[in-house]
Amino acid sequence: MKKFILITAITAAFAVIMVSCKNNSANQLVPADTTGLAEFQAMKAMQQEQEFADFQAWKASQQARQTKAVARSSSNSNTMSSSSTNEGKVAKKKGWSSAAKYGVIGGGGGAVLGAVINKRNRVAGGVVGGVAGGGIGYLLGRAKDKREGRY
């Protein structure tokens, strides 16, 4: 019973440490641009804007051609025709969810701690610790996903 309480306490402490680690990128200093990356990115952005403007002009000319073709074909025959340009939106992949990340990290950490703590049967300790850590990590990650609106 003492070992179970010890495993639970260590796993809970590990989970609290993992949750409290945050990336505070606003507090970090921005290094000086010595390689000219900012200039390159600005040039690349201007090129993309020009390509986008060229594409919009091409698309407008194509739609004008289609409209003229439809007008000619409808005046010459008694058939109905329509054209539409529906473009599907592709959802961008967001990567791993926080629940998955925290579950994997918690499972790995719990397995290591369980194997270290249970000296008689390291495999059983690793399995129990991995399951417990993975479960706790998953629950904490799921809560973070809910806060961020991913779930």
Image: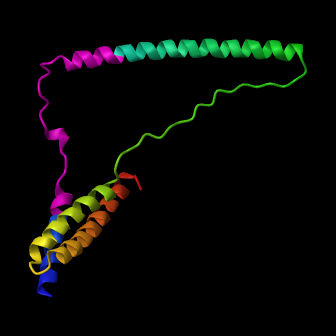
Looking at the image, which is closer to me, 96 or 141?
Answer: 96
Q: Residue at x 15, y 73 (%)?
A: 114
List the single residue furthest toward the bottom: 1
In which quadrant is the C terminus drawn? bottom left
Residue 9 placement (x, y as % from top left): 14, 75
- Residue 28 is inside the magenta segment: yes
Report which quarter residue 2 is drawn in: bottom left
Which residue is found at the position 50% from the left and 38% from the top?
Answer: 90
116 to 100, vertically: above or below: below
Residue 29 higher or lower than 147, as above or below: above
Residue drawn at x 15%, y 61% is 17
Residue 46: horizontal and vertical position, in percent? 36, 14
Residue 77, horizontal then vertical, whole percent = 89, 17
User: Which residue is found at the position 72% from the left and 25% from the top?
Assistant: 83
Region in magenta: 16-45
The quarter of the displayed image where residue 8 is located? bottom left
Report the side of 8 relative to 149 (left or right). left
